[in-house]
Image (cartoon, coloured by chain):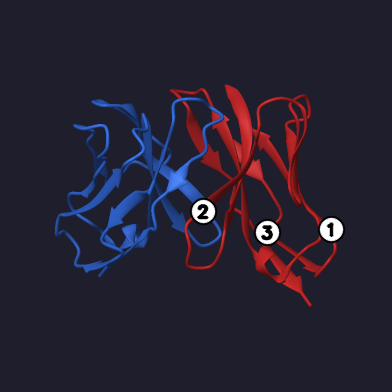
Chain colours: A blue, B red
């Protein structure tokens, strides 16, 4: 089954404790992206990657890191999480064309206390 | 800057037709997409418009006018299961195929 898999689904952590949210897709998609969703703000792009070893900042990259060492994986790293990073996070992937739809993972709800 | 505007909420009755508008300001515009998200779920793709005009997919249609920087999603024969949030999203060439989402429109379908 074609899918984007994110883990974990829920995560509660404390300020400053490094964490990684994993994302993997099995559709051989070139493009992968991370979004955060907050009430009233929609989905805001954190980072995106056009292909292996090619990443770029989205609209809200501060406090986040990503890497794309393999085509299928695009982990999101929070080196020192803070409470303002409490949010719902989605990973997405798509083919290379502008008309290729984004396929989203099921989301990771992160709480930083 | 880049921005998308869509209504925050729309309410309609079952069986009716509803239109959700989206206006945008971006650079490097490639196309406009629409996504649906039910509570607790992930966004799912509904439609894409790269050229001016209407695209129809079953009960849903989407329209784009590039000259007016405007698009809409039209939902016909509304069903209770259509109650969800709907997001317009612009695909922009700025730095690659970057997708920017609007804040979303919450659709309530009443019996």
Q: Residue furthest bottom?
A: B111
Chain-order first, disc 3 or disc 2: 3
Are labels 3 and 2 assigned to the same chain? yes
Mark 2 element type:
loop
Residue at figure coordinates x 44%, y 30% from the top left = A95
Relative to residue A59, is residue A98 depicted above or below?
A: above
Q: Is residue B20 visible?
A: no
Badge 2 crowding class, 10 Å Cα cut-off, few under 14, some 14 to 19, many 20 or more, is many
Mark number displayed over residue B17:
1
Q: CA distance from mark 3 to mark 1?
A: 18 Å
Mark 3 element type:
loop
Using the image, name the chain to which the residue with label 3 belongs. Answer: B
The residue labelled by disc 3 is B8
Q: Which one is in front, A26 or A17?
A: A26
Q: Quadrant of residue B57?
A: top right
Relative to residue A90, is residue A9 depicted above or below?
A: below
Residue at figure coordinates x 52%, y 23% from the top left = B93
Mark number displayed over residue B43:
2
Using the image, name the chain to which the residue with label 1 belongs. Answer: B
Q: Residue furthest right?
A: B16
Residue A45: percent from the left, percent from the top?
43, 42
Q: CA distance from mark 3 to mark 2?
A: 17 Å
Residue A69: percent from the left, percent from the top?
19, 32
Q: Residue furthest front?
A: A1
Residue A73: percent from the left, percent from the top?
25, 40
Relative to residue B91, is residue B6 depicted above or below?
A: below
Badge 1 crowding class, 10 Å Cα cut-off, few under 14, some 14 to 19, many 20 or more, is some
Q: Which one is in front, A58 or A70?
A: A70
């Amino acid at each position: 089954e074609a899918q984007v898999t994110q883990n974990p689904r829920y995560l509660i952590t404390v300020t400053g404790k490094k964490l990684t949210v994993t994302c993997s897709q099995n559709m051989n998609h070139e493009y992968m992206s991370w979004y955060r969703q907050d009430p009233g703000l929609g989905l805001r792009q954190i980072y995106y990657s056009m292909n292996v070893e090619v990443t770029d900042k989205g609209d809200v990259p501060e406090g986040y890191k990503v890497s794309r060492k393999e085509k299928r994986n695009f982990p999101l790293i929070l080196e020192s999480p803070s409470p303002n990073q409490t949010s719902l996070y989605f990973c997405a992937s798509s083919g290379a064309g502008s008309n290729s739809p984004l396929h989203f993972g099921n989301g990771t709800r992160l709480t930083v206390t | 800057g880049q921005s998308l505007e869509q209504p925050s909420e729309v309410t309609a009755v079952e069986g009716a037709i509803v239109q959700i508008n989206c206006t945008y300001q971006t650079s490097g515009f490639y196309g406009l997409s629409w996504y649906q998200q039910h509570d607790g779920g992930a966004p799912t793709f509904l439609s894409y418009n790269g050229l001016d005009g209407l695209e129809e997919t079953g009960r849903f249609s989407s329209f784009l006018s590039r000259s007016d920087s405007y698009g809409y999603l039209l939902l016909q024969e509304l069903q209770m299961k259509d109650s969800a949030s709907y997001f317009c999203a612009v695909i922009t060439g700025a730095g690659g195929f970057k997708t920017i989402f609007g804040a979303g429109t919450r659709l309530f379908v009443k019996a």
